[in-house]
Image (cartoon, helix red, strand yellow):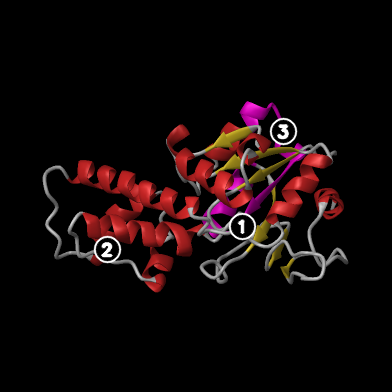
Amino acid sequence: MTLHALLFDVDGTLADTERDGHRPAFNQAFADAGLDWNWDVALYGKLLAVTGGKERMKHYIDRYRPDYRKPDNFDELVAELHKAKTRHYSALAARGGIPMRAGVKRLLAEARAAGLRLAIATTTTPENVTVLLEHSLGPGTQDWFEVIAAGDVVPAKKPAADIYLYALEKMGLAPADCLAFEDSENGIRASRGAGLKTLVTVNDYTLDHDFSGAAVVLSDLGEPGAPNRVIAGPDLGQSFVDVAYLRALHES
């Protein structure tokens, strides 16, 4: 059983995009539309139980704003708000306002040098992925990824396994050939549902999530001289994740 490819979630996994990117972008879109909706850090953490931005807005109204009277064109309003949010997110990312998480850029470069194939499997929109990669990872880095499975390319979003199954089909690979990278309970339910062994790096929003079935749960990928912490799973005797670590994890 040989490791051939790495499949990455984006939001919360490659970068802390949820708290520092999507949340303020949603709030700006709401303000622009004259709405009194405001998602603070704590509330947004609760809303993240719902995947997909449009779905999240609808859940917010149903759960937290019984006072709000939905207009007849509510679905169209939500779609327009989501487009505005994406514009604000893109502008923030283009200013370099959403840095990559520890170890991400190093590991991606090492994986490419070692001949591992790379893909993305995310519920966020393709535009969000592109702008984050180009401005936070570097120009041309979008081309590092053989497949970018994103947004509405499949009808059912995480925790459904569809986005991972789509990426695997496009790459012509079996789940046993790959490792997935996730940060949330919905994410690992999706990756494990596709049969993928999964490495989890937690963030502030997902510390208390259920990561049953994860191959390992880490604080982050770590760097030489800036060790990560093993939260659950095997200690493979290394304080940061590199290609050798991934191969050992894949075989374990």
Q: Is residue 136 magenta?
A: no
Q: Which residue is tagged 1?
A: 100
Q: Is residue 58 visible?
A: yes
* Residue stretch in magenta: 168-194
Q: Provide residue 64's location: percent of width, then percent of height.
A: 26, 66
Residue type beneath disc 1? Met
Residue 150 shown left or right of residue 194 in the figure: left
Tell me whether the residue at label 3 lies in contact with that at label 1, contact meaning CB atoms closer than 8 angstroms. no
Task: Assign a secondary structure to mark 1.
Answer: loop
Q: Earlier in the sequence, mark 2 or mark 1?
A: 2
Looking at the image, is mark 3 or mark 1 nearer the viewer? Answer: 1
Assign a secondary structure to mark 3.
loop
Give the labeled residue for mark 3: 174
Locate residue 134: give its quadrant: top right
Q: Nearer the N terminus, badge 3 or badge 1? A: 1
232 left or right of 77 in image = right
At label 2, which amino acid type do we have?
Arg
Q: Residue at x 68, y 37 (%)?
A: 144
Picture quadrant of residue 210: bottom right
CA separation in Å, label 3 and label 2: 40 Å
Q: Position of residue 128 (x, y in %)?
A: 47, 45
> Is 61 on the left-hand or right-hand side of 125?
left
2 vs 1, front mark: 1
x and y, in percent, of residue 117 in the image: 74, 36
Q: Secondary structure at mark 2?
A: helix
**Residue positioned 21% across, 41% down in the render:** 76
The numbered dot on residue 63 is 2
Q: CA distance from mark 2 to mark 1?
A: 32 Å
Q: Does 186 lie within the magenta span?
A: yes
